[in-house]
């Protein structure tokens, strides 16, 4: 396994068409939106999708969805206990935090990528792992519109008069939006968790195929797509340009007042002197 020699930066351009990319449970599951009208996808949502892709690719994941559990564990504590090495290492006040972190990173890909806090009821010590992969909240390039659809929900239940009637509901959609996902991999933190160059390759594959197998009523198959990905693999751990400068080098300009498709944007890559050119997928 080879080490991550330099910092890695990545940027994805994601299109949303007639879908709800990330509903806000405090707003009746309306698509997340900032006060300036820009659509938003939370970093937690993006990490969930990446974890699911890791799992689809055959790798062990610590934070799993109940309906996607592949090891029979129904909680994180149960998953810790299923790993005999980690269970034996977590012994109250005698717990060696570094050893526990090392075992967890070796066991689960998402732990050595994103980090994790191991603090459970009944244990006297918590163990924290800081991961090298950071993901920002994704924002749309232009303000989004939200369509409201009235739908009929049939639950086929029964009341005192027999079968109950169907109920009315609401569904929210974004007709079109271009969202930008940004993230980085720290070589220094990769050393600490054991995140390797091979792991970075798995992350790249997961990002490129982020929405495969992710269809639902809110975002049907094909309604969300990674249209372009930029991947900077620097030779230095501290390149001359900061991640913010790297991300600003991708310049996206609307060609029309209200963009309705990916082609309504002009996308340019500004060259940064002394910085490696990105792989464009």
Image (cartoon, grey):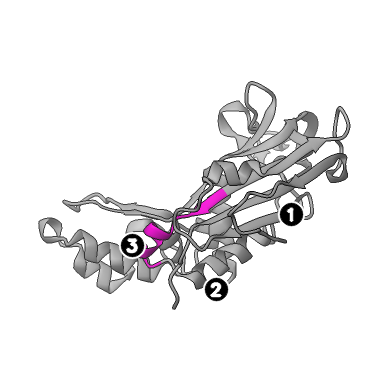
- State the image coordinates of residue 165 (x, y, percent, origin top left): 75, 34
Q: Which one is in front, 278 or 178?
A: 278
Which residue position holds label 2?
58
Q: Return the residue found at the far left.
A: 94
Which residue position holds label 3?
192
- State the image coordinates of residue 29 (x, y, percent, origin top left): 63, 33
Q: Nearer the viewer, mark 2 or mark 1?
A: 1
Pick whichever of labels 2 and 1 is earlier in the sequence: 2
Q: Which one is in front, 264 or 55?
A: 264
Please tell me which residue is depicted at 79% across the width and 45% down the height of the picture: 267
Q: Is residue 230 above or below residue 29?
A: below
- State the image coordinates of residue 107 (x, y, percent, origin top left): 38, 70
190 in the magenta segment: yes
Q: Indicate the quadrant where residue 248 lies.
A: top right
- State the image coordinates of residue 207 (x, y, percent, origin top left): 63, 58
Which residue position holds label 1?
228
202 in the magenta segment: no
Instruction: Give the CA separation, mark 3 to mark 1.
Output: 31 Å
Pick whichever of labels 2 and 3 is earlier in the sequence: 2
Label 3 crowd (10 A; few <14 / some 14-19 / many >=20):
some
Instruction: Give the CA separation, mark 2 to mark 3.
Output: 24 Å
Q: Return the residue found at the far bottom.
A: 1
């Amino acid at each position: 396994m080879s080490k991550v020699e330099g910092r890695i930066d990545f940027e994805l351009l994601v299109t949303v068409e007639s879908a709800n990319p990330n509903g806000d449970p405090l707003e009746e599951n309306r698509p997340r939106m900032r006060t300036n009208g820009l659509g938003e996808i939370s970093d937690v949502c993006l990490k969930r999708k990446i974890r699911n892709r890791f799992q689809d690719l055959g790798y062990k994941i610590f934070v799993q969805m109940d309906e996607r559990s592949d090891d029979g564990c129904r909680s994180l504590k149960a998953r810790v206990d299923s790993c005999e090495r980690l269970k034996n290492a977590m012994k109250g006040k005698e717990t060696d935090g570094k050893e526990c972190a090392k075992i967890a990173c070796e066991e689960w890909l998402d732990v050595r990528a994103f980090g994790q806090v191991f603090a459970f009821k009944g244990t006297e010590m918590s163990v924290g792992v800081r991961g090298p992969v950071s993901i920002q909240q994704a924002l749309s390039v232009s303000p989004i519109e939200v369509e409201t659809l009235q739908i009929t929900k049939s639950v086929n239940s029964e009341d005192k008069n027999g079968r109950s009637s169907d109920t009315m509901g609401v569904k929210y959609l974004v007709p079109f939006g271009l969202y930008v996902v940004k993230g980085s991999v720290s070589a220094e933190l990769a050393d600490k968790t054991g995140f390797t160059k091979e792991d970075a390759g798995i992350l790249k594959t997961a990002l490129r195929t982020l929405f495969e197998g992710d269809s639902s009523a809110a975002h049907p198959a094909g309604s969300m797509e990674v249209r372009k990905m930029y991947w900077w693999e620097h030779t230095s751990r501290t390149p001359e340009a900061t991640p913010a400068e790297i991300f600003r080098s991708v310049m996206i300009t609307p060609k029309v007042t209200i963009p309705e498709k990916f082609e309504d944007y002009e996308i340019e890559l500004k060259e940064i002197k002394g910085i490696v050119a990105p792989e464009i997928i």
